[in-house]
Each structure stands twice: as C-alpha cells, then as structure tokens.
Image: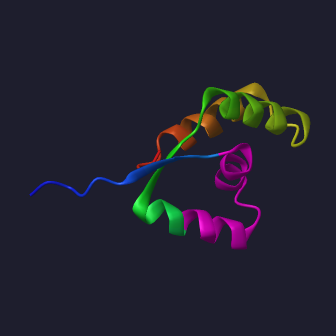
Amino acid sequence: MARAQRRVIAADTNIALRLILQDDAAQLALIEAVMVDQRLFFPLTVVQETGWVLASRYQMDREDIADALSALAALDTV
C-alpha cells in the first residue's frame, strides 16, 4: 500500500529555532500538529540564519550548532 503523500511547506527561522530549542511549548505544539500532515522544507537561507541566531543570541559553539542543525535535518518530516 502506498503512503499518502504529504504537502511540503517552507518553514522559517522561527520554526527551526522552536524545534531546536523547544523553548515555547505552545508554538512547539502548533508546529508538531502541522508536521502530522505536512513536511517542512527549510531553505538554505533559513538554515544559515538559524545558525547565526544560535551563535549570536544563544552563544552556542559551532559543534553544538552543527549537531542541532543535523538533528533538525534528520527529522522524518523535514
């Protein structure tokens, strides 16, 4: 039986940050609800900005940023 194809939507930096940081339960719940029926696409500019925000605002080092972005990319719905 073929799997139902989900729509793909472009996600922004806020969505990437909420998934990585999990610092806003309400927004995370909304994102997870969307991810049930839809796949997320993160444009390269969003990935770059997310890395910049993690470094500048959250003082994360390069290794932690790389790990966070890798975990984001590894999600089933990304």
The x and y percentages for residue 13 are 72, 43
Q: Is residue 10 left or right of residue 1?
A: right
The x and y percentages for residue 5 are 29, 53
Q: Vertically, is 23 above or below 11? A: below
The x and y percentages for residue 69 are 62, 36
In the rendered image, residue 11 lying in the magenta stretch gets the answer no
Q: Is residue 60 left or right of residue 37?
A: right
In the rendered image, residue 22 lying in the magenta stretch gets the answer yes
In front here: 55 or 34?
34
Q: Is residue 52 left or right of residue 47?
A: right
- Seen as rendered, the residue at the extreme left is 1
The residue at the point 56 percent across, 43 percent down is: 72
Answer with the quarter of the image where residue 44 lies.
top right
The residue at the point 83 percent across, 37 percent down is: 53
Q: Vertically, is 49 above or below 27? A: above
Magenta stretch mostly in which secondary structure? helix
Stretch of the chain drawn in magenta: 12-32
The x and y percentages for residue 51 are 75, 32
Q: Is residue 76 left or right of residue 72?
A: left
The residue at the point 48 percent across, 60 percent down is: 35
Picture colour scheme = rainbow
